[in-house]
Amino acid sequence: MVTLGELVMILDLARQGLTVSAIARRTGHDRKTIRTYIARGLEPPAYKPRPPTPSPLAPFEAFLRERVGRFPDLTGRRLWREVRDLGFVGGYSTVTDFLRTVRPPATPAFDWLVLIWLTTLALVVARGWAWVAGF
């Protein structure tokens, strides 16, 4: 693919009268590529978005939602094996990517950072009182 700067340079060199081979040598592109871009001119490329492809996991999404809803602690590896036994031919990462969107967010059992902060604050306050009292 040729960038816009390279395209302008190719068209400028062609306007100066250089041959296609000379332009190809200078830019490092194939002669056929140079011919194509000279014939096209400054027309912007007409790229279109690709149509979405159906996921190979689509037939198994309801099964996975039901299993995760009933048992949220099932591992991705186990669920991948289960859908593979049902006929899924895709990879492990396809299943785990889907599970990240389906699983409920994990709630932390205890916030250790708050405990450490409070303990540190209590030690600082206790040392401050000890210093004031002269210990």
Image (tube, rainbow, N blue to C red):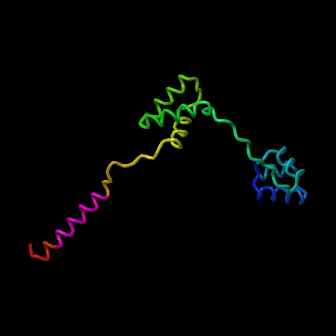
Q: Position of residue 105 (x, y in %)?
A: 45, 47
116 inside magenta stretch: yes
Q: Residue at x 51, y 34 (%)?
A: 66
In the image, 69 versus 1, the foreground residue is 69
Q: Position of residue 102 (x, y in %)?
A: 52, 41
Left or right of 14? Residue 133 is: left
Q: Residue at x 64, y 35 (%)?
A: 55
Left or right of 14? Residue 52 is: left
Residue 58, by quadrant, is: top right
Stretch of the chain drawn in magenta: 114-128
Most distant residue in the left direction: 135
In the image, 31 versus 94, the foreground residue is 94
Q: Quadrant of the C terminus?
A: bottom left
Vertical comparison of 64 with 39: above or below:
above
Left or right of 46? Residue 95 is: left
124 inside magenta stretch: yes
Q: Position of residue 49 (x, y in %)?
A: 74, 47
Q: Residue at x 87, y 47 (%)?
A: 35
In the image, 35 versus 25, the foreground residue is 35
Q: Position of residue 84 (x, y in %)?
A: 54, 25
In the image, 73 versus 42, the foreground residue is 73
Number of numbered discs: 0
Dominant secondary structure, magenta: helix
Left or right of 94? Residue 54 is: right
Vertical comparison of 90 with 99: above or below:
above
Q: Residue at x 39, y 48 (%)?
A: 107
